[in-house]
Image: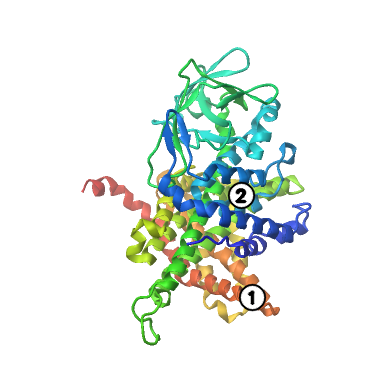
Amino acid sequence: MTYRAPVEDLAFTMRHVAGLEESIAEGLYPDLSVELVEQVLEEAGRFASERIAPLNAPADRTGAHFADGQVTTAPGWREVYRAWAEAGWNALPCDPEWGGQGLPTLVQTACVEFWNASCMSFALGPLLTAGAVEALTAHASEDLKRRYLEKLVSGEWMGTMNLTEPQAGSDLNAVRTRAERAGDGTYRITGSKIFITYGEHDLTDNIVHLVLARLPDAPPGTRGISLFLVPKFIVNDDGSLGARNDVRCHSIEHKLGIHASPTCTMVYGDAGGAVGWLVGEENRGLACMFTMMNNARLAVGAQGVAIADRAYQQALSYARERRQGRAPGAGEGMSPIADHPDVQRMLLTMKATTHAARGICLMTAAAIDRSRLAPDAEARRKAHERASLLTPIAKAFSTDIGCEVASLGVQVHGGMGFIEETGAAQHLRDARIAPIYEGTNGIQAIDLVMRKLPLADGTTVRGAIAEMRKVGTRLVASRDEAFGATAARLREAVEALDDATSFFLKALAGHSLADALAAATPYLRLFGIAQGGTALAMAALAASEARAAGDANPAHAGRIALARFFAENIATGARGLAQTVMTGASALADAEAALAG
């Protein structure tokens, strides 16, 4: 099934949910117009649909191959990657000082969805490069920026993130990779890393590894971790490539999904130590790496949306063609399964949750832009806190939705969904990694309740809830009968979130750590439902206003119907989640006995 980039839906959500028009009117995005954004999305969608998407299924079957320390990517990969980079897509959000286009995170996030929907394995390399560019821009010395940024920005070289070791996954306290001062301003890196995305490949002439390592005199724990830039090839003073560095790929993993993305085990220091350069300050590497990881977490959220949308498009197409049984009210003969109410329920669930997650990701991107571009420090501070609050929700809720929607896609296909040739199974296999990497979704939930809810003494989360209530008030005032019970159900979801938030803030104030940790994941889901339902309602309100003004675009009726379906069929679970948050933790007191039984 051919992928169609949802350009109109993205543009509409950016305008009416993420506040693109208001930001342009405020001067937040100089020299940017809605028309220009739509042109960028059109071109990105065309490249994704026509050039990248046809590689998806063949590359999944072929995979990446490893032999004699070299990784060979799938057929066609190099040509399409180079065409993609030459077209400027890698440089889209980067600083013009280093050859970037300087477009906002909001536009980049929309394009990231297109790249990942067309082929998640392909998009993973550029995702890590974008994070490396951000980390180096924020923390590297001027010499490192001069040597590396221009070619990373252009996509001529690619970047990686080297955190994980066999004993150090989510807990980076256990990092053992060593760094020794060489006496000339460089360091020698020894050790190994696992699960390194695009750690070795044939797409670019050089690969720039950002590696966490520990100095001999470093303090224990994460306070003693430093970040180093370790290139595959040493870069000479004139910018040319010199000697091969003492770093190699030992093997690649055989994985459930993303088969065409090489996931590498990397070895540093076979011949005495790989040459590395410090990024930022000694023993402050984790702060530098989090600059990269925060960028990646929103992008991974967009991956969840992307896989969900691809799975939905395929399921809808199949359901319209596949005939079985006779739907209620149908004439003679078998009906398309898309006419059966339970299949319609599945398809609507897929679409509604996908659009809700998309709205959250684009809201997060807009908050990140405002945190960097707002004209005064106070506005930037508030926007930064809002972005910080939304980022774990964007990552975790959206990637959970990616898995759920891909699973429903298999169900819509029935037995054929379990057969690889339809492609429905690939979406589910690919989607499954996203809730795991870049900080598991459980860690995102803990981050939300332990670090993000207390921001500004709780005023950040209270402000977010107040904004949701304003949307509910607008729904009531609209008096559009097409909304049905949307206003009432959304209001109940927001009130459930408010109750659960009050419970958490009280628990945190009383140092009830067990209660907070036990209920973090259902709380994040509750937040995602309330925020996602609000995003759908904002789009639906804009659609209702457009219809009232005479705009006959049939998509407007669909946006209203989608918001109503979400409110009346999905948001109704919010109160149950709130009850789980406030009372479910007590059941964990007997967890040991229950698990033993």
- What residue appears at the point 60 percent right and 64 percent down from the top-left corner? 9
Coordinates of residue 310 in the picture (x, y in percent): 49, 59
Picture quadrant where residue 128 is located: top right
Which residue does the numbered mark 1 point to in the structure image?
Answer: 553
Q: In the rendered picture of this protein, how many numbered marks are placed on residues?
A: 2
| Tag 1 secondary structure | loop
Q: Which mark is residue 220?
A: none
Dot 2: few (<14), some (14–19), or many (≥20) neighbours within 10 Å? many
The CA span between labels 1 and 2 is: 33 Å
Picture quadrant where residue 133 is located: top right
Earlier residue among tags 1 and 2: 2
Give left or right: position of 246 versus 151.
Answer: left
- Return the residue nearer the eye: 306 or 3: 3
| Residues under numbered marks 1 and 2 in contact, where contact means CB atoms less than 8 Å apart | no
**Is any atom of residue 359 visible in this view?**
yes
**Is any atom of residue 363 visible in this view?**
no
Picture quadrant where residue 267 is located: top left
Against 391, residue 188 (above or below) is above
Against 455, residue 174 (above or below) is above
Disc 2 residue type (three-letter): Ala
Disc 1 residue type (three-letter): Asn
Q: Which mark is residue 387?
A: 2
Dot 1: few (<14), some (14–19), or many (≥20) neighbours within 10 Å? few
Q: How is the image coloured?
A: rainbow
Frontmost of labels 1 and 2 is 1
Coordinates of residue 123 in the picture (x, y in percent): 54, 46
- What residue appears at the point 54 percent right and 68 percent down from the top-left corner? 491
- Return the residue nearer the eye: 131 or 483: 131
Against 218, residue 576 (above or below) is below
